[in-house]
Amino acid sequence: MLREITQADFELFWPTFQSVIKAQETYAFDPTMSIEDAYQLWCVTPTKTFVYEDDGQILGSYYIKPNAMGPGNHVCNCGYMVADAARGKGVARQMCEHSQDIAVRLGFEAMQFNAVVATNEVAVKLWQKLGFVIIGTLPKAYRHGTLGYVDSYIMHKQLRTQ
Amino acid sequence: MLREITQADFELFWPTFQSVIKAQETYAFDPTMSIEDAYQLWCVTPTKTFVYEDDGQILGSYYIKPNAMGPGNHVCNCGYMVADAARGKGVARQMCEHSQDIAVRLGFEAMQFNAVVATNEVAVKLWQKLGFVIIGTLPKAYRHGTLGYVDSYIMHKQLRTQ
């Protein structure tokens, strides 16, 4: 079930969040950030944040926010995280589809991912399957935990025509 | 002369800042933002902010900050603004060249502009002259004050090899 996050949910989700940022394979977040800073970043700054809950377990979470202000605030940005135990079960796909519905309901017209790490092939392929297009490659924009400098992709999907 | 900004400088620069954001032709900033929010955004959040001062007049200003956190914090982002009265005098060029020197001194390895409005041809051409490359086009990502929806470019320059 996808529903809006609570602070208690985030505390349950924190081990997943921490393992994702410590791995330094997907997110450009400070790997040593505190739970307070993470909560601010993931749950307070965004417009909305959701969890994917299954039988009391938090299997995933995503946020949605404007990608820019003023004349750029019709494009949104989302970030998704899935618990290790829930990989391969379609949680990311369901969250991304949900986020596109929410985006349209919030009035956004397009969705942009600013830095999809090129070596994160599972994510790149899933976003492509869901209609996102790589519109640019940022050369060596990410210092991968085990692979060193790798490229990042900017991915984009128009949700509504203007 | 380029030097670090003070709060008094920003107050002198505010009419330029306000005219730039109200025009809605170049920046994805809220056109109605207060001077307090603008000061926070332009002078507090960034790593450093500079002014171009000439005989007590503030002709331009720019900020520099990391474009991402953690494993992405070797790429910086800058924003530049020039006073109307100082256009065509090379102020933007001098600020961009200065910012590249500062970037390297701060340890950044590349510089990225996330949304150069495509119709801002003077800026696009200047950044290209200074070695920046358009690495992607964001379709209709900016609602231009007079032209409606226009594209934005992501521009990038490698400052040091890794």
Image: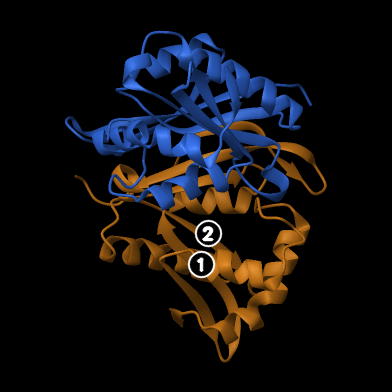
Chain colours: A orange, B blue
The image shows residue B53, relative to residue A160, as above or below, that is above
Q: Amino acid at mark 1?
A: Tyr
Residue at left offset 56%, top offset 91%? A55
Q: Position of residue A139 (x, y in %)?
A: 64, 30
Q: Chain of mark 2?
A: A
- Residue underneath mark 2: A79
Residue type for callout 2: Gly
- Residue B127 location (% of width, % of height): 49, 16
- In the rendered view, tell whether residue B87 sits above or below residue A6: above
User: Mark 1 or 2 closer to N-term?
Assistant: 1
Q: Nearer the viewer, residue A98 or A7?
A: A7
Q: Secondary structure at mark 2?
A: strand
> Is residue B72 visible to us here?
yes
Kindly indicate whether the residue at mark 2 contacts the one at mark 1 (C-beta within 8 angstroms).
yes
Q: Which element carries disc 1, helix, strand or loop?
A: strand
Q: Residue at x 75, y 45 (%)?
A: A144
Q: In the image, what residue occupies the spot 37% across and 9% down? A: B88
